[in-house]
Image (cartoon, rainbow, N blue to C red):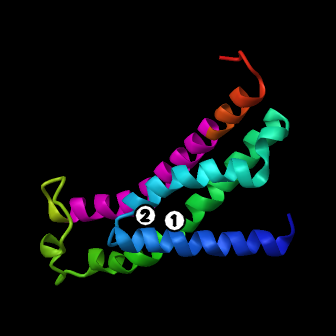
Amino acid sequence: MTRRTILRRLGIYALLDLLCAAAGMGVPLFCIAFGFLVGWRTVRLLGLAEQSIGESLARILLWAGVTSGVTFAIMAAVWGRCLPMLFDPAADIANFGMPLILFEPRASFLAWIALMVVVSPVLQFLVTVFGAHVALLRDVKARVPGIM
């Protein structure tokens, strides 16, 4: 693939990931689910079923890292602007709108930001790898009869 093709596909992915984040109103639930489709499609677009297993797995991890990096950047832009509220004594964190999962506003706020910015891209990485492995397994089963 040429560099221009890679950048075009990455731009399309970033736009679709941004739309998924917007559909979830800043909560990347749809971004995580979109990771399965991206992983599935990565196997097809890169032709990984015809390559060696080591090279295929390395490329799957690379592209899953890129996709979760894009989601991390989007979530950092959406939720990162709220971090100064931690240091503002006049900020009303209890009425910010996030769930009080730890029963203390400041701790819940910090946990919510960590969940949105850090944990969600990691989950998307895992779902993208899973989708790619399912597609790779399906292709291998189709090429090699009686493998499973």
Residue 50 left/right relative to 39: right
Residue 27 left/right relative to 109: right
Instruction: Decide whether the magenta segment is chiefly helix, strand or loop.
Output: helix
- Residue at the spot x=13%, y=70% of the render? 94
- Quadrant where the C terminus is found in the figure: top right
Q: Is 117 within the magenta?
A: yes
The residue carrying mark 1 is 72
What is the three-letter code of the residue carrying label 2? Val
| Number of marks | 2
Along the line of sight, which residue is nearer the eye, 40 or 68? 40
| Quadrant housing residue 111 | bottom left
Provide the secondary structure element on which disc 1 rests.
helix
**Does the CB distance between marks 2 and 1 fall below 8 Å?**
yes
What is the three-letter code of the residue carrying label 1? Phe
- Residue at the spot x=47%, y=49% of the render? 123
- Quadrant where the N terminus is found in the figure: bottom right
Precedes in sequence: disc 2 or disc 1: 1
The residue carrying mark 2 is 117
Along the line of sight, which residue is nearer the eye, 91 or 117? 117
- Residue at the spot x=61%, y=48% of the render? 40
* Magenta stretch bounds: 106-134
Q: Is 122 within the magenta?
A: yes
Q: Position of residue 120 (x, y in %)?
A: 43, 56
Cα separation, mark 2 vs mark 1, equals 6 Å
Q: Position of residue 20 (x, y in %)?
A: 44, 68
